[in-house]
Amino acid sequence: MAIPTSLIAFCVALFGSLGLTAPVRQFALRVGLVDKPGPRKVHLKPIPLLGGIAIYLGFAAAILLTQHGVMQQQTIAIFSGATLLAIVGFLDDGGLLHHQVKLFIGMPVAALLLLASGIRAQLFSQFIPGNAGMILDGCLTVIWVVGITASFSILDHMDGLCAGITAVAAAFFTLAAYMNGQTAVQTLAAATLGAALGFLRWNFNPAKIFMGDGGAMFLGFLMATLGLKIRPDGAPFPAGWLVPVLILGVPIFDTTMISISRLRRGLLPFTSPGKDHTAHRLSNLGLGHRGAVLILYLLAGLLGTMSLFVGRFSTGTIYALVGALAVCALIAVVFLETAPYERQIKLQKSSSPT
């Protein structure tokens, strides 16, 4: 019996990331690339950066070893876009780039690489024929990729949070792809799952190493790509876009919540870093760092489980579910706005938003 390609990809990425993190950590300490404590940090001592290198190499090994012959055009585009953002992120971690370069240049260019290979959102073209629908879908693709990639970049603010949420989301993308017979997507998701889990062993509280922006952007781009690639088989129209939104519900909610909160206080969401994220507020309610992260893992798991069944719902039920989720999200935002958190007094300049 042949071993599934996705299982091979998972194991290679898992053990690659797990085994490479220790030497990468030593390298970061040797060259002095550490994240120092500060007013908007939750750690109290310098922590090595560059953990994203181990994640990247584990994932790359898994993809290269599971390719049979010449790499497919879309695989090349995905790998190229992810590599571009990893490099941009590593340069940002080293203080060699202005943080706006990654948001306004790196992420859009990576999205254009996907578009060039034929990977795009398929929403407007279902209702608007011709080039107009395709152009709108292209714009939506860029917005989706930039938004999801950025959401994972700013999600990396507490030990184990970004890696753990990525692992949960990748697990559900793997299951969804398996249920819909999408073998290539399943392999891609399984490799992402393995790479994130291997690193999580070193990154969970108390973290021994951080992935840095190179790792967070790399994982965020892969999550955005998987969201574009997943196709629920035979599901009604709304399910096609609701599945990835549910699987990525936690980072989407966190980004939305801090955007609303900061705008209400006269701050620009991505240029006013602070300890006002969902995890910070949950921690301040008495859950502590581990408790806050585990609660968000649980929420990601519940939303992911829902995504596996949404394709079986009727169109009316799906719209009712969307309405209910929107109301719950609004209530959560209102509640979290009353929770204790450190408020930014004025706009701050930073080399890297969080």
Image (tube, rainbow, N blue to C red):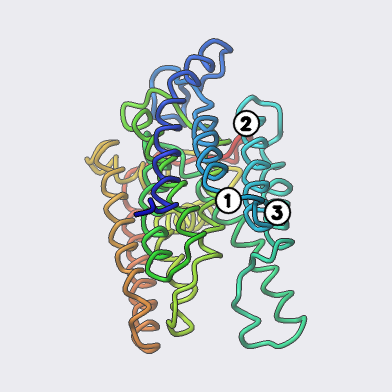
Q: Residue furthest front?
A: 1
- The tag earlier along the polypeptide, 1 or 2, is 1
| Residue located 54% across and 10% down the image | 30
Camera-side mark, 1 or 3: 1
Camera-side mark, 1 or 2: 1
Q: Is residue 352 visible?
A: yes
- The tag earlier along the polypeptide, 1 or 3, is 1
State yes or no: discs 1 and 3 in contact (Cβ < 8 Å).
no
Q: Label 2, on which residue?
A: 90
Q: Which of 86/143 is in front?
A: 86
Mark pair 3, 2: CA separation:
17 Å
The residue type indicated by label 1 comes to His
Q: Label 3, on which residue?
A: 108
Q: Residue furthest left?
A: 286
Could you classify mark 3 by the number of other residues whose Cα lies within 10 Å: few (under 14), some (14-19), or many (20 or more)? many
Could you say where residue 24 lies in the image, as x and y percent from the top left? 50, 21
Q: Is residue 266 above or below residue 327?
A: above
Q: Label 1, on which residue?
A: 68
Q: Is residue 130 above or below residue 220?
A: below
Query: Which image quadrant is residue 243 in?
Result: bottom left
The residue type indicated by label 2 comes to Phe
Mark pair 1, 2: CA separation:
30 Å
194 left or right of 68? left
